[in-house]
Amino acid sequence: MEKVIEFMHRFLEDESEFTDEELDLYKIALTHSTYGSQGNQRLAFLGDAVLKQIIREHLYLKNPYDCKGILTMASSRIESNNNYSKIAINLNVFNYMRVGNPALKSHNITANAEALEALFGAVYLTKGLQTAKRLAEKYILNNNL
């Protein structure tokens, strides 16, 4: 559990104490489906939707003259598994994950992308949309625009 706390303090840039419910969600977000327990895929499903909302709202507001096609191309580039994976790799997310398959490598695109999405799902549930937006701006939007 210490690894989860360490990572989440760094990720959130917040040293405050976590509730047991928060820690449970963060632990799930950092658990790959091969671990043998509840994996992070449900949280990744939610986090994907949260990130889409944040990214698309950002693009809509920052590009008032772009048409739907241009906004869609920009969002699909940012919302790609390759992009999310690169961000997760830069954050060393895999080093904090519980993984049951020893053959799964730290540079696995899907595992890293899902973990990042799951983290955003967990942050949305525990800290709210504003915190998720702040983190998306820091880790995703500022690096892709």
Image (cartoon, rainbow, N blue to C red):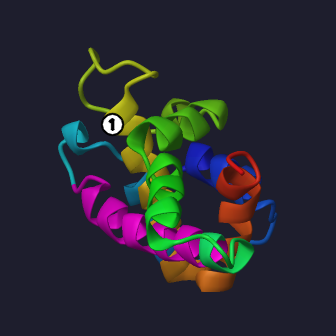
Residue visible at 38% across and 30% down in the picture: 109
Residue located 30% across and 21% down the image? 104
Question: Which quadrant of the view contains residue 74?
Answer: bottom right
Amino acid, disc 1: Thr
Q: Which of 20 and 14 lies nearest the eye of the viewer?
A: 14
* As drawn, 15 above or below 143: below
| In-image side of 103 versus 66 (left or right) | left
Q: Which residue is mark 1?
A: 110
Whether residue 38 can be seen here: yes
Secondary structure that dominates the magenta span: helix
Residue 145 rendering spot, x and y as whole percentages: 72, 51
Q: Is residue 25 left or right of residue 10?
A: left
Segment tinted magenta in the rendering = 38-58
User: The residue tagged with tag 1: helix, strand or loop?
Assistant: helix
Q: Is residue 18 visible?
A: no
Residue drawn at x 22%, y 57% as measured from the top left = 38
Q: What number of labels is visible?
A: 1
**Left or right placement of residue 139 versus residue 1 in this view:** right
Q: Residues within 10 Å of mark 1 (few under 14, many from 20)?
A: few
